[in-house]
Amino acid sequence: MKHTIWLLWDHLHHDHSILAAASPRTHRIIMIESRSAGARLRYHTHRLTLLYSAMRHRAEELRAQGWHVDYHPLSDKKNAAAEALAAHTKKYRTESFHLIEPTDYPMRQAVTLLAKKISTPIHTHPDDLFLCSREEFARFAKNKKRLLMEHHYRAMRKKLGLLMTPDGQPEGGAWNFDHDNRAGIREFVRAGSPQAPPPPWCAPDAITRSVIAEVKKYFPAHPGDPATFRLPVTRQRALDWLNHFIRHRLPLFGTYEDLISQKDPLLFHSMLSPFLNCGLLRPLECCQAAIAAHRAGAAPLNAVEGFVRQIIGWREFVNGIYWEKMPGYLDANALQAERPLPRWIYSGDTRMACMHHAILQLQATGYTHHIQRLMVLGNFFLLAEARPPDVLRWYNEMYIDSYDWVMAANVLGMILHADGGYMATKPYAATSAYINKMSDHCAGCHYRHAEKSGPRSCPFNSLFWRFWHKHRDRFSANPRVKALIAGWDKRPAAEKHAVLQTADEHLKNIDTL
Ligand code: SF4
């Protein structure tokens, strides 16, 4: 055996294309826990625990299948990958390493550098973690000034034949059912505040317990407490998690997908992204499981379509944009936002109830659902003119499912409009009216959601109007917001002055909001 397959920490899928074409007689496997990769940013400790523990469990599975796995656990070594590859080559007289193309740019650069350092050739093979290849997405994006997720999503539905009728039409006569998926907190309470049973949390086994101890030791300043980690780390347990979601949460997922509840952070969300993004689950099988539930009459179309769109719509789209626009995408700052993050952004020590709860939840679990990401946290970053690289770093550090390819387009494109509208037709800015409609935060907040000016007025309100006032030239012809800007222009001068002054005060005192 002169050839070795290198499995990266997010390439743990059971149908890994290089593994499928090889055998324990022809190839060895090497797996390397890189401390420098884990410390590239201050990643959440639950993210690190998930990835290192899933790697160790995957190595055990492969050994049980007869593979020779050369495993290099976390260590003090500075150049763990280079040293491990060199030692492996020397020991086994390896002639070539083979890995799937890394999912993000920093890892791709690291592999390119390694290939120059070591004498053994490193061959990369096409990325097989996604349903749309980078080449296919490039063809979709070619010659387009602006990309819309909806167009790509429809093409993916047709290509994969998901939720399509035999004559090529979308099932239910529409491509999406978002109008059925916007129930707010009052509808939720009127419906008796339905609750799903808790997901199948996993008590850490011996492998995970040792990872938790090592994550504590090697990454002491990272957010989150690894001792509270309870997520699946094997494919089987991740499948249990998927099946539990399909049975218990999918039926109401659509109706309440935009809702935020202090009492139940997960609500009816799947929280599958951490497992999808490291390969424990596969995108197509998740979609097919949801569609099978719909066919069996166990889940309505609005829920299933919304779930499928998150996976073959948003997930594939943000990955495609990442590779289409990198590396320059990270420098995007179309709105010239230059303010630092507030001091409390890691601790959650703020009187803004919605921000406080989202940050505490992140500290505890590394997870919030998409509306907290976009319309609470992201909305605040946008309106507070936070510097895009700082915001991107924060999202990468705080979320358990973060990878460069996930966060770049989500943060720079969707949240901050920093790419100038390449992937969003307008900025996702909102006042407290939206947060108050969708959440149970405002009633207990220090700030008054119905006020636009004055020291106790909700910061989202005055900052919202300041945002459109400041960027009116850029957006006043945009059909989606021009009426809003025209409405602001018609307000009495004294009212506008009070709102803008309040916004300036909030920005000046942002560290103590
Ligand atoms: Fe958030 Fe404003 Fe509501 Fe407070 S009043 S919870 S800051 S939206």
Image: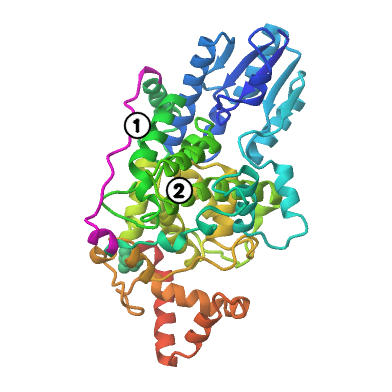
Q: Is mark 1 within 8 Å of ligand 1?
A: no
Query: Where residue 484 sits: x, y (%)?
Result: 50, 80
Picture disc at residue 304: 2
Tell me the quarter of the image containing the N terminus.
top right
Task: Give the amino acid at mark 1.
Answer: Arg
Element marked by disc 1: loop
Q: Which residue is mark 1?
A: 230
Q: Is residue 441 visible?
A: no
Q: Nearer the viewer, residue 381 or 294?
A: 294
User: In the image, is residue 190 above or below residue 408?
Assistant: below
Indicate the quadrant of ligand 1 in the picture. bottom left
Whether residue 443 sits left or right of residue 395 in the image: it is: left
Query: Where residue 225 sits: x, y (%)?
Result: 35, 36
Q: Residue at x 56, y 54 (%)?
A: 170
Q: Residue at x 36, y 53 (%)?
A: 358
- Determine if the magenta segment contains residue 80: no
First along the sequence among labels 2 and 1: 1
Q: Give the class, few, some or many, for how many residues have Cα within 10 Å of label 1's Cα (few <14, many ≥20).
A: some
Q: Nearer the viewer, residue 107 or 287?
A: 287
